[in-house]
Image (cartoon, helix red, strand yellow):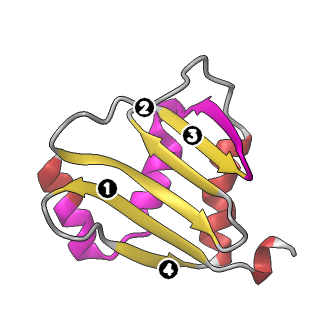
Amino acid sequence: MNDTENKWVCRVIVYSGLKDPEWIITDENAMKIVGFYDSSDLSSADKHDTKQFGYRGCLLMCSDGRSWFAFDGIIEYRNKGINEFRIDKNRDFERGIIMTAPYNIQALIYRQQ
C-alpha cells in the first residue's frame, strides 16, 4: 500500500477533560510532515515527558498503523512494535501538524501553551 491510499488523521493531546480534537489531512500535507521526520536526526531519548496540564503534544496517524507523536522537540515514531525517537529541530514536525488544524483547534492549542 502506498501513502496515497492511506487515510491520515491528526490529533492534539490537550489535558482539558474533553475528547482530544482530531482532523483528517491530505496526502500532500501528510507527506510534507513525514518529510520533516525523515530528514531529522536520531535522538537518544526513549520517552516523552508529558506530565503537565494543557497542551501535551500531537499525533499524526496513518491508516496503515504507523504513527508519529511530537512534543517538546522530540518525535516518536511507532510501527508494528518498532519505536524510534528523532529530534524535531525547530519543532518543524510538530508545527507542521498544528498548521493543518482548523482555526478553532489552533486557537485552543495556543491558549494551552
The amino acid type, in three-letter code, at marker 3 is Glu
Query: Start and end of the magenta stretch?
Result: 80-108
Q: Secondary structure at mark 4?
A: strand
The amino acid type, in three-letter code, at marker 2 is His
Please report the residue visible at 47 percent of the width from the left and 57 percent of the height from the top.
59
| Residue 32, percent from left and from top | 65, 60
The residue singled out by tag 4 in the image is: 24
Q: Nearer the viewer, residue 71 or 96?
A: 71
Q: Is there a contact, CB below 8 Å, between mark 1 and mark 3?
A: no
First-in-chain label (1 vs 2): 1
Q: Secondary structure at mark 2?
A: loop
The residue carrying pointer 1 sits among few (fewer than 14), some (14 to 19) or many (20 or more) residues within 10 Å by Cα, namely many
The amino acid type, in three-letter code, at marker 1 is Ile
Please report the residue visible at 45 percent of the width from the left and 48 percent of the height from the top.
94
The residue carrying pointer 3 sits among few (fewer than 14), some (14 to 19) or many (20 or more) residues within 10 Å by Cα, namely many
- Marks 4 and 1 sit apart, C-alpha to C-alpha, by 15 Å
First-in-chain label (4 vs 1): 1
Q: Nearer the viewer, mark 4 or mark 2?
A: 2
| Residue 7, percent from left and from top | 64, 80
- Marks 1 and 2 sit apart, C-alpha to C-alpha, by 13 Å
Please report the residue visible at 33 percent of the width from the left and 76 percent of the height from the top.
102
Task: Specify whether 68 is left or right of 1.
Answer: left
